[in-house]
Amino acid sequence: MSVDVEQKMLEMMQAKKIFRKKYKRANQLFNDLVKSQKLRLEGISREKEDDLVPDKINVKKSIQSLNEIRKILFETDRLILNSMKDYFSTDNYLFQHSFGVCYIGTIVLNRFNELFSQYIDNMLTAKFKENLEHYRQDEMAPFFYYPPEAVRTISMGYLAHDIGKLMIPDSILNKKSELSRQEFIEMQKHVGEYGTSFLKMNGIYDVYVENIIKYHHAAIYLNEKKTYPVYRSPSDLPPYVKICKLADIYSAMTLKRSYSEAVNPAKVVNTIFRKYSGRDPILQLILYSFVKELGTCPEGSILTLKNGQSVYVINSQGPEIIIFTDQAGNTIEKADKIINLSSPSSKSQNLVIDGQHLPKTPVEMFDRLPGYLKKFHSE
């Protein structure tokens, strides 16, 4: 490998080694919450037999745990987060999915907040520019759609969005074939009956968290298919819930599920944008925030150049890539260099992503990855 690739991968491996301990801690905190919740559910099922009312989970302690998990998330390089995904097993799916939705949802929400603030500032300045003789932009406090304390609560709601699935039988959650009508009705309960039961039995009364849990599968545009439950109108659904829905779709599709393999992140971004684009201004701003944060080529994506070479994305900005096959598809074990595809030199060499070439899934390409990339993903 060239010095820049070797140095980059060395740094990433060292950072991942440190993060793995934090990730294990986050996983343990999450699993402790899940276990306490299951014990609570088992207690409720025994109430009629022994007349004992089980204690609620310790809400304060749970919130502290959720905050610790969030802190771990946002101190970590995005490529490392993506490299932690298990593309070959669903054993730890609920944690990985909840972890992913929290991270993606929160960074998109923050970008949405930032862009909305800029648009409001620009609109007000343009509207009243003739009367703003004493106006100084640096003195104007930004207007945020959601204040910081709301963002923190929403972020924790993202982490707990699927908590109602603890009440769904494993035979349904892990079913490899299509759900029957009755099974699908049972699955739908994780957002309504079961999700709200979780909040009530633990004394959690927060409209942000409740809306996230109840409506993250609701329609976000008029006449959207295969959605539930019915909200009064897609246009009335709060933006933070719509963001959760997109984050939920992205996270689920980029992980291995019981009934399907992981999909290439670049393909998922493209699929989401095409489906939801052009609906209404707020949803368009959400989508714009989504693409700006994740990029059209998310870290960890495996793409194909027009010359036939396969590349690994290490930074969505640019994007910056490592070429790991020749034009015939043979693995190149020693990388030449890290390439920024937006640079003049890349363009002069016609190093361009082939938009017509379907992105490969991580599983499809794993055997063709060079040793250092395999090691980065598997360790």
Image (cartoon, grey):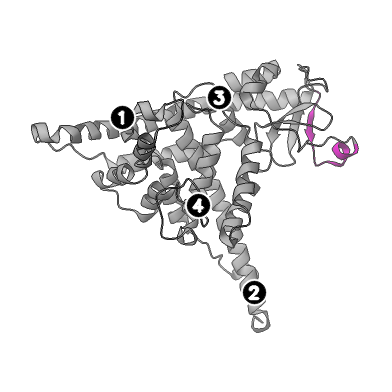
> Do we see residue 59 in this rendering?
yes
* Spatial separation of the CA atoms under disc 4 and disc 1: 29 Å
Quarter assignment of residue 323: top right
Residue at label 1? 35
Residue at label 3? 87
* Spatial separation of the CA atoms under disc 4 and disc 2: 29 Å
Q: What element carries label 2?
A: helix
Residue shown at the point (78%, 18%) measured from the top left: 332
> Of all residues shown, which one is farthest toward the right?
348
Q: Position of residue 28 (x, y in %)?
A: 39, 28
Residue at label 4? 242
Q: Residue 125 carries which label?
A: 2
Nearest to N terminus: mark 3 or mark 4? 3
Viewer-nearest of discs 3 and 2: 3
Viewer-nearest of discs 4 and 1: 4
Nearest to N terminus: mark 3 or mark 1? 1
Q: Looking at numbered disc 4 in the image, what kind of residue is underneath it?
A: Lys
Q: Looking at numbered disc 2 in the image, what kind of residue is underneath it?
A: Thr
Nearest to N terminus: mark 3 or mark 2? 3
Quarter assignment of residue 355: top right
Viewer-nearest of discs 3 and 1: 3
- The magenta stretch is 336-348
Nearest to N terminus: mark 1 or mark 2? 1
Residue 222, above or below 340: below
> Of all residues shown, which one is farthest toward the front?
181
